[in-house]
Amino acid sequence: MTGTLPTGVERRRFDSNERLATRGQPVYGEPTDGDWRAWDIRRSKLGAMLDRGMETGLSGDETVLYLGAAAGTTVSHVADFAGPTYAVEFAARPVRDLLTVADSRPNLFVLLKDARKPEAYAHVVEPVDVIVQDVATRGQARVANENRRFLKQNGRLLAVVKARSEDVTADPTDVFETFRSQLEGYEILDTERLDPLHDDHLAVVARPTW
Amino acid sequence: MNEDAVSDSGWFRGVDPGDGSSARHAIEHGSAESPAAWPDHAVESGFVDNRSQYYEVLHDVTTAVARTQVREREGTDVQRIIHCVRAMDDVERVANELAERVSAWAGASFDDPGTGIEYAREIADETAADSEDRRGALDARLSSLAAQVRALDDEGQALRDTIERVTPEVAPNVSMLAGPVLAARLIALAGGLETLAKKPSGTVQLLGAEDALFAHLSGRASSPKHGIIYVHEYVSGTAPEHRGTAARALAGKLTIAARIDHYSGDRRPELQAELDERIARIRERGD
């Protein structure tokens, strides 16, 4: 538990509770304190990873590829502390909300693309320091493998594996084991289950091997 | 530059910085095998003067593309919902017709025939359970027909479930006020969410009452007070003398909701509160 928070993410008090926070326009009705807005770790798996002190390798200001940005709850905080942030999301409805998030964040680039087909956005996305992966689809290991091409040499993959997206009937432990064995070209640095904040989710920190 | 071959496939290649539509086309339809240091390439090729200008342009273009794509994609979702609600009506109508036939037929075979889809389901379930008792080729056909009614009824329910799940995603505010099924019907009658958003409130009030309206316009009838929105509890549950007022209030809020759903997409819970309060006041009026 030696994880340090990236620059731009702090623990601050909101209503007498200490919570993670970043500086930026509020997005989902979270409490604010001046420029700072609370990061709801119940709604954000990356937030939960940072809160638990996982060593994510994030230091602030990095270039990020975010796969599965959804309505932008988490990616809004990422764009607050990171540099250029490319947000890929395939479903049209949440992208509408994501665009509102991007309106006040000039470093956030919204791409309505399928994370399983990186060729469709490799002409836009530059090599990145960090890939955050939070996709609700089968074949999550394949998504990570396909997108490895975007990672710089000492980059990090921060993936959250949803057991129920792979197979609702299987034991989550088995699903996580399969994910580990299917991950290619990565060295896993750390894993942690996010229960009870996020049931049946495994957080994975990995770096590409060359 | 040893990376020239790769930079050839950057989205900005061949795009005039002043030409928004070709830039949008390149983002949406372009592709590359691998990423590259696009911001640097863009500066080197003279597409932009510096990196911060590159990110500014990229932000504007990606946002514009995503906004257009969302609108187009939701347009096709709306078309699917329209098919779905029409299919549900077809299925329910056919199920009811066949259920009547089953009931009439059963009257000839059994002593106490019931009516409706429920009875057809009973026949189907029962006969499947003890088919030994139902000898004779004719009874077998009857039970098979009843099973078709049951299947259609299940299909209608599945269509309804789908409408209830999908419509709130596409039209959250109209679905909140009208309920997902009535919302889907209004969208279908208008021919789309955009067309519904562009209709004046008086037209929304009378959607589905076109026959009555034209009868009125040709002088054969009094003016209709409501169309399909009659099925909403706020209209049908209001005393007849105030129904026209209630229908007008509901249609007004639905029109605003449709415009928010089409043009901005945020949820506005206050619309529901405003409508609730307005209807309560209409109902309080004495006559």
Image (cartoon, rainbow, N blue to C red):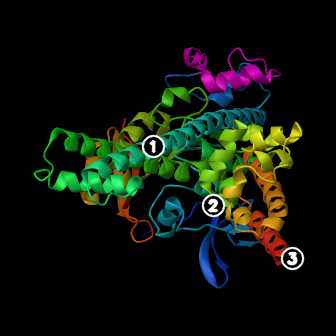
Quadrant where the C terminus of chain B sits is bottom right
- For this orientation, the residue located farthest to the left is B132
Does residue B196 appear left or right of residue A49 in this picture? right
The kind of residue on which mark 1 rests is: Glu
The Cα atoms of the two marked residues, 1 and 3, are separated by: 42 Å
Instruction: Single out the residue that lies furthest toward the bottom.
Output: A16
Q: Where is residue B82 in the image (x, y as percent from the top left)?
A: 60, 38
Using the image, tell me which numbered label, if any, was put on residue B41.
none
A27 and B228: which is toward the camera: B228
Question: Can residue A72 be seen by looking at this rendering?
Answer: no
Q: How crowded is mark 2: few (under 14 residues within 10 Å), some or many (20 or more)?
A: few
The residue type indicated by label 2 comes to Thr
Task: State the image quarter where residue B173 is shown.
Answer: bottom right
Give residue B32's position: percent from left, percent from top. Answer: 54, 22
Circle 3 packing at 10 Å, graded few (<14), some (14-19), many (20+), is few
Q: Quadrant of residue B247?
A: bottom right
**Residue B5 image-quadrant placement:** top right
Residue A206 vertical position relative to residue B68 in the rendered view, above or below: below
Mark 1 secondary-structure assignment: helix
The segment highlighted magenta reads: B1-30
Q: Residue at x 46, y 69 (%)?
A: A52
Q: Which mark is residue B285?
A: 3
Position in image of residue B178 (x %, y %): 68, 57
Provide the residue designation for mark 2: A7
User: Residue at position x 66%, y 79% from top?
Assistant: A13
Q: Is B23 in the magenta?
A: yes
Element type at marker 3? loop
For mark 1, what is the residue? B97
